[in-house]
Amino acid sequence: MAGPTNFVSPLKVGVLVLASALSFGAFLQIISTRGYDASNSYEVHAVFDDVLGLEKKSPVQIAGIDIGRIKDVQLYKGRAKVTMIIQGEVELYEDAAVEKVAISLLGDFKLSVEPGGASGARRLKNGEEIKNVKSISSVDAVVEEVREISKSMRKLISGDENQPAPLEKIVSDVELSASAARKVLEVVSENIGGNTEKLDDILDNVRYFTKDLSSISSGRDRDVAVILKDSRLIASALKNTAQSLEKIVVGQDEKEISDSVKSLRQTLDTLNRSLDTMSSILEKVDRGEGTIGALINDDGIHEGIDETVEGINEVLGGITRMQTWVNLRSEFQFRSGSAKNYVQFVLKPKEDKYYIFEVVDDPRGVRTTITEDVESTSPEMGRSFQYRERTTTTVDGLNFSLQFAKRFYWLSLRFGVIEGTGGIGANLHFLDDRLEVLVDANQFGIEARNPRMKVLALFEPMKHLYLHGGVDDFLNQGTTDYFIGAGVRFNDEDIKTLLITSGIPSTQ
């Protein structure tokens, strides 16, 4: 039996833990309800087709400034009714508009409000509805845009009734342009050939003219001789120029021009064949032949794409709706005179289904039992017997729990690993989950020992903070223990509020 000194020291630790938990819970209560005075606020609501990503306490803003929060989201005639708490000094009018806007890449959304206030518009009163709602989702917008692109492609390829397709007309215009270019090249080639003959004629005429001047100048005086000499020089220069021009036009450069024209003709022929092939392919696509034709013309494939996008939307919706709860609790055990601590994480993809992962620091340590059947021989000849040895060891360490839970109204059933061994459990919920009764059973199949049963009652006097007590292992005499304790629990929304309050940058 533990003495008075051993009892007082753990009790001080328990009182310190309880005081810290009360302070932390009060802090969370203050920051989670700050800025919303019921006497200086009013409620309005709006009906949406889609509220994916909107949760309770999501911000309501005008021009990026918070003016309120979402109070509740309910099902209303097959649609979603969203109730908002608005600060009293903010005025909204009957022509106000509200829209769901994404605030991060993680699937979080807010409500953006245009207050309205056109001439003659009446101010909204407490409980009235904002009727101008923009609730189309980004995924629906993408699907609609894909449909419009598909229609435009089909119109480009097929065209309107009794009119040629735009793409077919483009191909026809390219063919006409290629034919016109071919004619221009033929005319240029003919002109080059004709000009070469004319240059030859000019050179011949120059030769004849120089001969005439030579015959005329014979027997003249010195001035005529000088003039003729200059004329000869001029004629020589003209001849050299004519010869150079002849080499340029008739010689090697003419061959290069001919080769260039020939290469251009081959390029145009290749382009014509490519256009013919493209025209054939487009005709097959228009008739729905081949894989591309089937993709463009088959309405069933379009419907399949729509269904696939809807399935992806549902999966992403489930991920963005997942909630995370963190639960920290400590309990003082009277028999052992020490504290047992728990760190628990709860993942809730749906309101009626969740997963529990828990780390337990048990002062009694981790117990391991090994049972062996030993066969031994008797001193008497020819006889043997068996006996059973059971070894139980206890070491310091952490226990782990991993459970799956399903809720049915006021009852939740759990199964999985409870503190290192297989077990089952149940939760009874009362007073809007502020009062709970938990029952755990594990350590089945251990010889000379009944299963371990634990009953715990939990009450939450204020948000995030709760007190609890109960009895552990009451089916086995000598190991029964009573305990009391306290704890705090909060979700990811509370963590976001805490981060914003402490000044840490967020994704908003």
Image: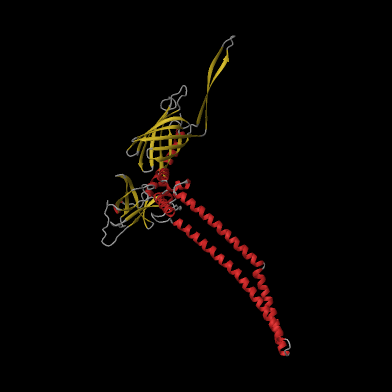
- At x 54%, y 55%, the residue is 273
Residue 379 image-quadrant placement: top right
Query: Could you say which is closer to the camera, residue 313 or residue 473?
Result: 313
Query: Could you say which is closer to the camera, residue 297 or residue 448?
Result: 297
Q: Is residue 233 above or below residue 108?
A: below
Q: Position of residue 14 (x, y in %)?
A: 43, 38
Q: Position of residue 299 (x, y in %)?
A: 40, 46
Q: Is residue 214 above or below residue 142?
A: below
Q: Position of residue 36 (x, y in %)?
A: 33, 52
Query: Could you say which is closer to the camera, residue 301 or residue 218?
Result: 218
Q: How is the image coloured?
A: secondary structure
Q: Position of residue 6 (x, y in %)?
A: 47, 34
- Is 310 on the left or on the right of 250, as rendered? left
> Looking at the rendering, in which quadrant would you find the N terminus?
top left
Does residue 232 appear in the picture of this structure? yes
Disc tally is 0
- Is 302 on the left or on the right of 96, as rendered? right
Residue furthest to the top in view is 381
Q: Is residue 203 above or below residue 154?
A: below
Query: Could you say which is closer to the camera, residue 347 or residue 439?
Result: 347
Does residue 438 appear in the picture of this structure? no
- At x 27%, y 59%, the residue is 121
